[in-house]
Image (cartoon, helix red, strand yellow):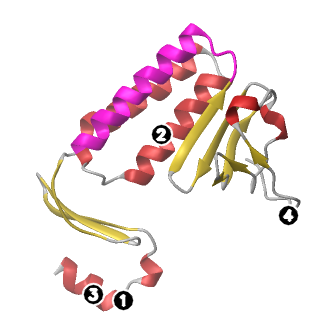
Amino acid sequence: MSEDKGGERKRHQISTLKDFGVVDVGDFIADEEILRIFSRSAKHLIYEKHSGVSYSAIDTTIEQRASIAHLDQLLIQAKRKFKGVHGESLQSYKGTILTAIFCADEVVVKKAIDNFEGFIRETPSVKNVVERRDNYVVWISEFGVEHWIKKTSEVNSGVLSNFYS
């Protein structure tokens, strides 16, 4: 992972980049700031921007393109099943799988994809999203009312006690 060096912020266009090694945290790609870099080489860049994990690559192989297409299909399936819930988990899986695709062998890629498929299969479907905020989401699944809180320190503990009661 890359750290912000506090230097000059560069603006890059994917279509003109020949070496992703020149891109750093804080730079802009297509007018979106790079918040974090998961993996980078001359031929690929896996990064996080405000809208989530993304990647760019030069000279991808047939196997890499097939794995990326499989990942895209799994993400579509997961978004439908979870109705936007578990977004951070999905982005984490996406970053891990993309890193495996560009930095590891086929065995590691298959294991990462299998883990993601297991998560999708084993996690209950979201029937209805009750409420969604930046810091939390409440939804109904086959197990009843469930929730996710991003920062429990920012939530009044009495409210949580009442909710669990």
**Residue placed furthest toward the right:** 7
Q: Which residue is mark 1?
A: 156
* Type of amino acid at the residue the image marks with label 2: Tyr
**What's drawn in magenta, residue-wise?**
58-81
Residue 161 higher or lower than 59, as above or below: below
Q: Marks 3/4: CA distance?
A: 40 Å
Q: Which residue is mark 2?
A: 93
Q: Which residue is mark 3?
A: 159
Residue 6, labelled with which disc? 4
Mark 4 or mark 2: which comes first in sequence? 4
Q: Position of residue 53 (x, y in %)?
A: 54, 45
Secondary structure of residue under mark 4: loop
Q: Position of residue 34 (x, y in %)?
A: 67, 52
Q: Verify CB contact (< 8 Å) between mark 4 and mark 2.
A: no
Picture residue at 11% right of the left edge, 51% below the top: 142
User: Is disc 1 surrounded by few (<14), some (14 to 19) or many (20+) residues within 10 Å?
Assistant: few
Secondary structure of residue under mark 3: helix
Can you tell which quarter of the image residue 164 is in? bottom left
User: Is disc 4 surrounded by few (<14), some (14 to 19) or many (20+) residues within 10 Å?
Assistant: few
* Type of amino acid at the residue the image marks with label 3: Val
Picture residue at 28% right of the left edge, 82% below the top: 160
Q: Is residue 70 within the magenta segment?
A: yes
Mark 3 or mark 2: which comes first in sequence? 2
Name the front one of labels 1 and 4: 4
Mark 1 or mark 2: which comes first in sequence? 2
Q: For this view, does 158 lie left or right of residue 3?
A: left
